[in-house]
Image (cartoon, rainbow, N blue to C red):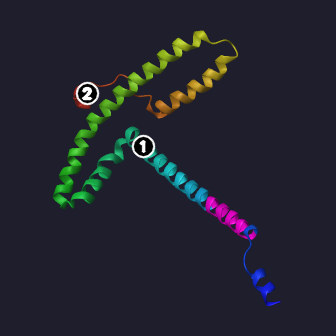
Amino acid sequence: MVRMMSNKMQPTKRSLGRVMIGLTVKIVIVAVIFAGGFGFGFYTSVKMIVNKARQYVHQTDSLPPDLTLLVDAQLDLTAEQEAQVEKVFDQRIVQFQDYRDMVLYFTNKFLDDIDNDIRPILDETQTPKWDAFYGNLRHRWIPEDQGNYLPFKMPGFSSSAND
């Protein structure tokens, strides 16, 4: 009788296999959840960085103070140095805006050329689909609030010299 009891207490190969399968499934589930969280966090971070970069490109008003704070955080500037650094960024932002306007001008021309080349190839059923696709493409490359880039100013010259 004692001998039979001890045999029943020992795990069989079958029950050990079920435990291993259950453990493997749990490990896979945890790994999938971890990978999903990592992927979502990475995607969210990249999306935020891209949105902030687009904001700085198209709305340059907040760029000099934000860049000054970034430099100050790295170099621990004095108040006088901070004012001088912000003045440099304020002066350079005009040149950045000139470059941005030039890029927007050529991007607009490039997109118009693509539209003019592809539109004649399409039939009546494809044209509305192209219009939707092309409209989305234009919106991604040239935001609607950036229609005032023509004519662009020559790079390297301040806006007041070109007006």
Q: Is residue 141 magenta?
A: no
Left or right: residue 124 compared with residue 153 = right
Q: Residue 139 at x, y = what percent? A: 52, 31
Give the distance between the C-alpha atoms of the residues marked 2 and 1, in whole angstroms. 21 Å
Disc assigned to residue 155: 2
Please give the name of the residue rendered at 52% of the width and 55% of the height, measured from the top-left corner. 38
Locate the C terminus by quadrant: top left
Magenta part of the chain: 15-29
Q: Amino acid at mark 2?
A: Pro
Residue pictured at 43% horizontal, 47% vertical: 49
Residue 19 on the magenta span: yes
- Which percent across, then down, holds residue 39? 53, 51
Q: Secondary structure at mark 2?
A: loop
Q: Furthest-bottom residue in view?
A: 2
Q: Position of residue 58 (x, y in %)?
A: 40, 38
At 36% across and 27% down in the image, what residue appears?
103
Dot 1 falls on a residue whose secondary structure is: helix
Residue at the right extreme of this rendering: 1
The kind of residue on which mark 1 rests is Gln
Main SS category, magenta section: helix
127 on left or right of 42: right
Residue at 48% x, 21% y is: 111
**Vertical placement of 109 versus 13: above or below?**
above
Q: Quadrant of residue 134?
A: top right
Residue to which mark 1 is pinned: 55
